[in-house]
Image (cartoon, grey):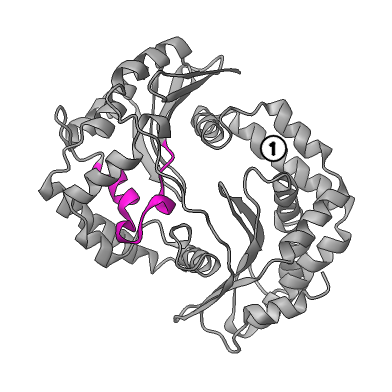
Amino acid sequence: MAVESSELSCGLRVVTDAMPGLETASLGVYFAAGSRHESAAEHGLSHLLEHMAFKGTARRDARAIAESIENVGGDLNAATSVENTAYYAKVLREDCGLALDVLADILTQSQFDAQELEREKQVILQEIAALQDSPEELIFDLFNAAAFPDQAIGRPILGTAPRVKGFSRGTIQAYLDRHYTAKNCVVAAAGAVDHAAIRAYAENLFKDLPRHDPAPLTPAKYLGGEILVSKKLEQTQVVVGFSGVSYADPANYAAHIFANAVGGGMASPLFQEVREKRGLAYGVSAFHWSFLDAGLFGFEAGAHARDVGELVAVGVDVLAQAAHDLSEIDMARAKAQTKVALLTALESSSSRAEQIARQTMIFGRVLSQAEVIGEIDALTLRDVRAAGAALLRTPPTVAILGTVKKPVTSGDIAARLAGV
């Protein structure tokens, strides 16, 4: 691995990782602009913009955009998340310049044709409707909304049908001008890449990006609470959670290891107690997600309506017990799982490009493998237990989707954790 990083005069950052032995390259253009950067009136706009970027430029129509990459055997795609939007391609070594040219074209010269806009709105409305048929995904939108009520960070990335229907070319362009700036952008590439060449391409292709400072981010405020949505389902979906920690928090690694240790696999205490000993759910797992200034921790499962109350009680008790007496074996397993996930990302150029871009946006630099593994290895059992206990002392959030015989409240969960 050979990570190189440069900052151009306009403020755009270029970061690459040359991976010996590869003949393909993964390239991406990442903007620190996602759903939490939207105002209430812009809810869903980041995702719509991602779609519209592929619908035609001054030089290429939608078909030509797709053919430009696919005709050389490559892939072209994009994704919107809470805190960033990514546009990326994977091509042969010799087609890196072409890939960046297409990415720059769709990001700086999109036309946002009125007919294309109306057509794409219909596609997104179908996507929003499809989410209602995916309870395993919908439950997390409900959970986020309950954890961060009336805040952009808690709103669904896709937006709502009324908002999407009302967007115009002008609203898209205004958002683009405000957030898609050079200082808000990272161009990342991994695999069969040359840093000097990627830098030269970026210097030329993105020279017209606006150069003003990024818009300030509204701080997230975790509040917690509860949400219950009645829906006829075979399984009732449940997420129970608490405030997590941010990327920059000193307890971030410990919180992640605690979540992995308590519910990161079939050998975890959560899975063993809920699934193997009691048969309350087919699957159950814990999670810890970090954001720039906040985080979320919890567990999720699907269960028969009659078992929801017991499932929540047992799950919360397992978390509380782990905060007191998590074993060395469970912690060691979680550390090993985390390191395997990290090292696996280093074996894929696509994962590596995403990783170095994300770290550059969050920390301003790429973290070395040795640094991250060193942080993980340095954690003691006391560190991990303490992190878990701190998470469980925050206000609970409970989201339930389906049929419930007896509602479970955040107050019930808080009372159960009174001694943590």
* Magenta-colored segment: predominant secondary structure: helix
| Image: 127 above or below 353 | below
The answer to which image quadrant residue 215 occupies is: top left
Q: Which quadrant of the figure contains the C terminus?
A: bottom right
Q: Based on the picture, tell me whether residue 48 belongs to the magenta stretch.
A: yes
Judging depth in this view, the residue of 349 and 359 nearest the camera is 359
Horizontally, residue 58 falls left or right of residue 379, namely: left
Q: Which quadrant of the figure contains the N terminus?
A: top right
Q: Position of residue 126 (x, y in %)?
A: 28, 61
Q: Position of residue 57 (x, y in %)?
A: 17, 33
Secondary structure of residue under mark 1: helix
Q: Residue at x 62, y 49 (%)?
A: 246
Which residue, as the protein is rendered here, is positioned at the far left?
A: 115
Q: Residue at x 30, y 52 (%)?
A: 45
Residue holding disc 1: 340
Judging depth in this view, the residue of 214 and 268 nearest the camera is 214
Residue stretch rendered in magenta on the structure: 31-52
Is residue 152 in view? yes
Q: Position of residue 64 (x, y in %)?
A: 18, 30
Indicate the amino acid at tag 1. Val
Judging depth in this view, the residue of 105 and 132 nearest the camera is 105
Q: Is the residue marked by circle 1 packed among few (<14), some (14-19), or many (20+) residues within 10 Å?
A: few
